[in-house]
Amino acid sequence: MIVTIRDVAKRAGVSIATVSRVLNKSKPVSDELKKRIMDAVEETGYLPNAVARSMIQKRTGLFGVIIPEIFNPYFSGLVEGIESVSKEFQYHLMLSVSEKDPEREKELLQIYRSRQMEGIILAAARLEEDQKEILARLGIPCVVIGQRVKGLKAPSVVINNWKAAFEATDYLIQLGHRRIGMIGGPFWDVASGQERYQGFRDALASRALPCREEWVSEGEGFLVEDGYKGMEILHSAPELPTAVFCACDRIAVGAIRYLEGQGLQVPEDVSVIGFDDEELASIIHPRLTTIRHSPFEMGRRAATLLTEMLHGNQSLQTAETLEHSLIVRESTIPLSS
Amino acid sequence: MIVTIRDVAKRAGVSIATVSRVLNKSKPVSDELKKRIMDAVEETGYLPNAVARSMIQKRTGLFGVIIPEIFNPYFSGLVEGIESVSKEFQYHLMLSVSEKDPEREKELLQIYRSRQMEGIILAAARLEEDQKEILARLGIPCVVIGQRVKGLKAPSVVINNWKAAFEATDYLIQLGHRRIGMIGGPFWDVASGQERYQGFRDALASRALPCREEWVSEGEGFLVEDGYKGMEILHSAPELPTAVFCACDRIAVGAIRYLEGQGLQVPEDVSVIGFDDEELASIIHPRLTTIRHSPFEMGRRAATLLTEMLHGNQSLQTAETLEHSLIVRESTIPLSS
DNA sequence: CTGTTAGCGCGTTCAC
DNA sequence: GTGAACGCGCTAACAG
């Protein structure tokens, strides 16, 4: 049933070495034999066993990718980017979803090592100390996406969340807003939760504006409903802020939804600014002012770094920071004094 | 550098077979040796080579997944569903993006066979004859998502696109609409393009309503901009339909966007109905009436079928049809006579 | 219980 | 040019 290189050799009346040579073009073989062999391959329907080949060549041609979830444009964008450059370099992808579970991530790292991945791309909301240790002694080129990893030879691909949040907040200030709130993501998420929150605080501080605690809420996640609840909390304060910075577009959508439900207008009553510029942002009403960055490009950079590491440039210790930009649309207006 | 089972055996002063036995718990071993071996494993940092293991066991524990694109909630939903049940059964995923290219799909099928995938899940917009042939003689359990494959032992997981489109259209008719148009996806896409179009036509015919060609447009894709262009084309007709069925939610969004730009109201001037009920649908204004189905569930079913085939139930010839339902929201209203 | 041996399917030395 | 033989790292008989 299962046809091996031996069957082809027998049928062509040559040795398996010769078959291997023509299949891999590794050594010259006479046209005569070449033809006989190709015919035999055709007739038997022989297909080389890539597993056996990987074992002997010690090259699997595989990258392992770990993401917290996939049903989220940010991560599917990453994967699409990674896939596009992997394909160029003839690599294939093993994909696993960690569900943000650090234990699962560690387990996957081991599995990928055991499965002889040639490179690993890890997108984690948060890297704990023991994970960093495992990464350090993994012995496989690895790129981390989304958060800077200090003291590790794994390069990372990030955007400057702090700066972006700072700029978003500062834009609100420039519009004349002084009472500014924020609906954040969970702070255990270093990149999208913590750093964006810090950027917000620092922007306020840099203009000597107070950060009023009742105008800040830490959400449970990054979903529309989290934004809805977050805005509800801000609304329970004695007075409402005139502008709100949201940790992501979906949160912004939820916030707007809540405000509408309360008969409040965006941006007339409250300016709202998002983060990510996912497709949604330019579709909803009002179209969202937000921070644009490109998960797809991050994925591409990460995979490119990986291939570079494989080609000698071992362990560039860089943290590559990709660009972001403020996209002004309709959800923010100057404070009407 | 690279530590093998031999190193562990040497260090523990036993044979490699014994090491293999305790690691796989395949045969009883004395506690004494067991401990010595586990210690040696610990000290050397030994991790079994899964590639060598797969070769000998003829089990890779891998499913291959082929999708046309990933940055699209439909396909990322599929993948998430597939991943969730694969994980339950201890399988891992190889993921490739075909970009709808039939040649690439065929190539990937070969690659997956060569790489000894134990099962394959193929989501293709259209299966050509030669692809079906390849599938037929692939020798690997395979499940097709999105389109019914006749005359093939590969089961498929689908929704009844024809029926759903019929129901959506019929709903518009029940609302009193008589001048009904459609913005379709490309018809070479069997499931989302062709079948939905056919359902639309048949619904009109069943009520003896004409299908006016100038109210039908075949889009180039399933994007917002395709919907925009499509509506523009319908608008160029002498008179406008009072209701439009769109092949997917994004097309519907584009159509609405165009109408708004022309100063027309949805649903007052034109009712619009979408398809897919992606998250978008309940977020935009007006909230979209649409057909709901679950890509996640399709992915789960596909992977479940695959594992069943692996466990003996060879080649169930079923085409499993998952449920859909009409979700009525704000983008459709009765025709004001 | 444990060790020795024979492969899994293939690429790659060597001799010829 | 070509073939025989070895080994990749491991599991599964087979003996003892």
Image (cartoon, coloured by chain):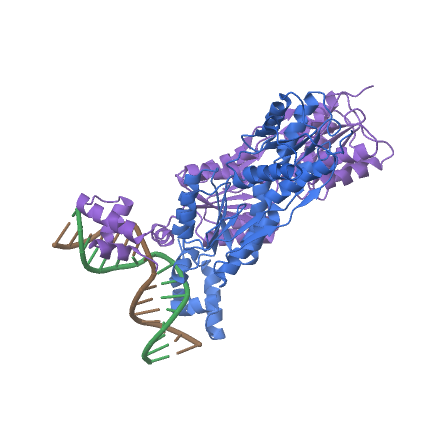
Chain colours: A blue, B purple, C green, D brown
Q: In the displayed image of the protein, which residue is found farthest to the right?
A: B238
Tell me if B307 is positioned left or right of B158 in this view.
Answer: left
Tell me if B329 is positioned left or right of A160 in this view.
Answer: right
Residue A299 appears in the picture as rendered: yes
Seen in the picture, residue A257 relative to D4 is either above or below; the reply is above
Q: Position of residue B56 (x, y in %)?
A: 34, 53
Residue drawn at x 39%, y 39% as measured from the top left: B312
Residue drawn at x 52%, y 60% as measured from the top left: A308
Seen in the picture, residue A17 relative to A51 is either above or below; the reply is below
Residue A279 appears in the picture as rendered: no
Q: Position of residue B281 (x, y in %)?
A: 66, 30
Q: In the displayed image of the protein, which residue is found farthest to the front?
A: A208
Q: Position of residue A213 (x, y in %)?
A: 59, 28
Tell which of B286 and A286 is nearer to you: A286
Tell which of B142 and A332 is nearer to you: A332
Tell me if A330 is positioned left or right of A48 in this view.
Answer: right
Residue drawn at x 87%, y 34% as measured from the top left: B238
Q: Position of residue B302 (x, y in %)?
A: 50, 37
Tell which of B195 and B63 is nearer to you: B63
